[in-house]
Image (cartoon, rainbow, N blue to C red):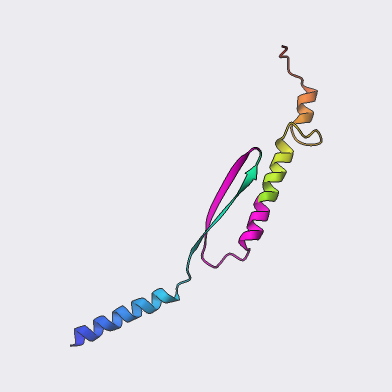
């Protein structure tokens, strides 16, 4: 009888501890950038203070900045000034 009661108490404690844990959610974000798409997944256990919308906005801002700095189609930024300073010797 004592073993049965001990077993019931152990199961009840295990279930109550499991109920105290925060649920972990998989957050999926995606979008278009630089002629392709991106997909980001992360786990949110409730400790992340930023919303998924804010995180998505930050990702978009970073990718926009990278595109501006690396694009040879945007003359104000990035690698285009280097290309005009050192023109290609390739001729058609």
Does the magenta run of residues contain 64? Answer: no
Residue 57 on image: x %, y %: 68, 55
Q: Please determine whether, in this image, residue 4 is positioned above or below residue 18.
A: below
- Range drawn in magenta: 35-59
Residue 90 on image: x %, y %: 71, 14
| The quadrant where residue 79 appears | top right
User: Considering the image in quadrants, where does the C terminus appear?
Assistant: top right
Check the image and name the residue furthest to the left. Answer: 1
Left/right placement of residue 90 relative to residue 51 reads right
Residue found at x 56% / y 48%: 39
Of residue 91 and residue 33, the one placed in the foreground of this image is 33
Residue 71 on image: x %, y %: 72, 34
| The quadrant where residue 81 appears | top right
Check the image and name the residue furthest to the right. Answer: 76
Q: Please determine whether, in this image, residue 80 is positioned above or below residue 40.
A: above
User: Considering the image in quadrants, where does the N terminus appear?
Assistant: bottom left
Residue found at x 65% / y 42%: 33
Q: Please determine whether, in this image, residue 30 is positioned above or below residue 74.
A: below
Residue 10 on image: x %, y %: 29, 80
Left/right placement of residue 60 relative to residue 10 reads right
Q: How many dots with numbers?
A: 0
Residue found at x 39% / y 79%: 16
Residue found at x 73% / y 12%: 91
Left/right placement of residue 39 relative to residue 78 reads left
Check the image and name the residue furthest to the top. Answer: 92
Does the magenta run of residues contain 39? Answer: yes
């Amino acid at each position: 009888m004592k073993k049965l009661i001990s077993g019931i108490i152990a199961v009840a404690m295990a279930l109550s501890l499991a109920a105290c844990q925060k649920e972990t959610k998989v957050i999926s974000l995606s979008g278009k950038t630089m002629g392709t798409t991106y997909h980001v997944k992360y786990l949110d256990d409730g400790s992340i203070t930023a919303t998924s919308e804010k995180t998505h906005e930050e990702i978009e801002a970073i990718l926009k900045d990278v595109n501006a700095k690396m694009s040879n189609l945007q003359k104000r930024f990035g690698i285009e000034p280097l290309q005009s300073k050192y023109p290609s010797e390739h001729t058609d």
